[in-house]
Image (cartoon, rainbow, N blue to C red):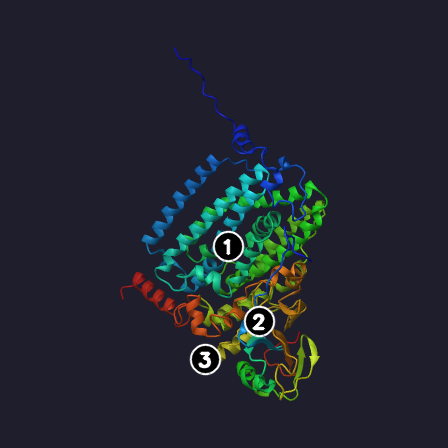
Amino acid sequence: MAVAAIKEYVGVPRDLVANFNGKQLVYASWDRHLLFAAPFLLCVPPEMPFGELVNGPLSMLVQADPDAAAIDWSTVEWLKANQPWTPDFSLSLAANGIGHKDQLRFRTAGVNTLSAKA
Amino acid sequence: MDMKVAKKKLGTKEKYRLMTRDLGWETTYQTKEDVFPYVGYEGIKIHDWDKWEDPFRLTMDSYWKYQAEKERKFYAIIDAHAQNNGHLNLTDARYLSALKIFLQAISPGEYAAHKGFARVGREFPGVGTQVACQMQAIDEIRHAQTQIHAMSNYNRYYNGFHAFADTRDRIWYTSVARSFFDDSMSAGPFEFMIAIGFSFEYVLTNLLFVPFMSGAAYNGDMATVTFGFSAQSDEARHMTLGLECIKFMLEQDPANLPIVQEWIDKWFWRGFRVLGLVSTMMDYMLPKRVMSWREAWEIYGVENGGALFKDLARYGIKPPKGWDDAEKAIDHMSHQFMLGLYQWSFGTAFHSWIPSEDDMDWLSAKYPETFDKYYRPRWKHIKKLADAGTPFKNYGLAKLCQTCQLPCVFTEPDDPTLTCHRETVYKDETYHFCSDGCQHIFEHEPEKYVQAWLPMPQIFQDPINGDLGEWMKWVSLIDGKDNGDYAGSEDQKNFETWRGMATSNQ
């Protein structure tokens, strides 16, 4: 719906990709691993290969979880925008279709030490 | 010879009429629409402003008299508190974290409410409404001032109080409250009244102030108890104004109902998210706890709120849309939020800590269905990491909700093991939310919320560009003093030393 206003009302988004000096935001989270209180916010270049994102910042961030060593990245299930999705680890984020502010989720079925059954 | 004339004294009713309602006039050389240009565009129809009832019938001269009396009492107690080292009567300096959050997030909200009421007092055409809003505007700035004065004494001794205005503007955990007030102040006058006058003052204020002030009393903080008392009689007036306003809108025209209902749904949910901060304070930050967040919700949310919406049902008002989701979140929200505050404590201007075994047993007794099952294992793991010398710090920062601006720490209403992921695309941009409630608010007015200034994405833009040290300078956070774990902090050390000096001969 339109904002009720006395004249035409147009908002300017604050977080456009152009504001990140050549980088973009990517959100990533590990399903049912809530030691990490919220999805991670990563600011990375779109040319970064997906494998580098996973083996670099993402692997580093999840270290604190007791299941971190048990992650087999070749078998994890991925979701992008909450839909099942298969990444190509050798291609860049852009070539994988990962846009600015996209949310990636991954699942490691059966591996969740700190999580109770729902 | 002069004739002696008996001095005529005005009765209260007459005085009120002459000194409020009679202050208005009919415009002659400008149209009413030009003088009050903002009163129509929200779609609320008012046919007779004289139907506005002011149950307090307070005139300005008596208002000044009452307030001045309260100020005198307040400052006498604050002075005594400062002179007698009242800060050493606290149960423990961990208590100060609750106070710091209050000063950084809530007191600036009082100031924002002052600006908002000053504005709507000008924008409403009815004289009764104008006077009531003007009084509330003055109340709110007085509350901001008394709170800042009361807490300034702690700033002389403890960290985290010194830059509350920057903290309010720039840090991440205060933006839930900042955006709440910004949202209301950029709305029209009627929506502002529903947001602040009704949802905040009437539905939510007891959940905020009663636990906070009782928390202060339980933990020996006389300064805060005093500003609480000083504000209390004002709050009663504010609640009445909020309730009067909603009834007035609903009685003036049946077409107002759906607009008012939409606002109630929105502002209940926005307020509920602000209360997330209060839940962590009640369950985790008070060394001597008053009651659990769950117990407070039962009394002030379910019982009082339930009675209110029963009363409003005759106008066709339904309980807020997010009510059921709120109820499902009650046994989880304080734990989910506190785990976040702890793991990002390098970026907070207050201290947090891993709950002790005793604390965890208390939480388990208060939350028998959820704490041991979901949250104790996480705290135990965090404790293990700390004991191993590798304390848990989550440098991943967090995805924030586009509407409430909190980190997306909350789970699916029916699955506490899964983060609630909600997103939408508007004009080719993706936006994320913590809940259906926040997504619904965005989708009702996307042009408004695309402009949200989200503290975490901002860290990666100019002028900070991802530099954590620069960010700390920019938010006036002193690393190693204001932030981090309470264990080993300067606040802990100082409090224990000074208290030792006050209570022993060492």
Q: Residues within 10 Å of mark 3 (few under 14, many from 20)?
A: few
Q: Position of residue B139 (x, y in %)?
A: 48, 45
Q: In which quadrant is the N terminus of chain A drawn?
A: bottom right
Q: Are marks 2 and 3 on the same chain?
A: yes
Q: Position of residue B228 (x, y in %)?
A: 46, 50
Q: Which residue lies at the image location 62% right of the left edge and 41% below the top edge? A: B33
The residue lying furthest to the front in this view is B29
The kind of residue tagged 2 is Lys
Image marks 2 and 1: residues in contact by CB distance under 8 Å: no
First-in-chain label (2 vs 3) = 3
Question: Which chain letter goes with mark 1?
Answer: B
Residue on which the image places disc 3: B387
Q: Nearer the viewer, residue A4 or B149?
A: A4
Question: Which chain letter goes with mark 2?
Answer: B
Residue on which the image places disc 1: B109
Q: Are marks 3 and 1 on the same chain?
A: yes
Q: In which quadrant is the C terminus of chain A drawn?
A: bottom right
Q: Position of residue A28 (x, y in %)?
A: 60, 77
Question: Which chain letter goes with mark 3?
Answer: B
The kind of residue tagged 3 is Asp
Up the image or down, B35 lies above or below B465; here it is above
Q: Nearer the viewer, residue B461 or B75?
A: B461
C-alpha separation, residue under disc 3 versus residue under disc 1 = 39 Å
Q: Secondary structure at mark 3?
A: helix
Q: Residues within 10 Å of mark 1 (few under 14, many from 20)?
A: many
Q: Are marks 2 and 1 on the same chain?
A: yes
Describe residue B358's horizontal placement relative to residue B86 as left or right. Answer: right
Residue on which the image places disc 2: B399
Image marks 3 and 1: residues in contact by CB distance under 8 Å: no
The number of numbered discs placed on residues in the rendered structure image is 3
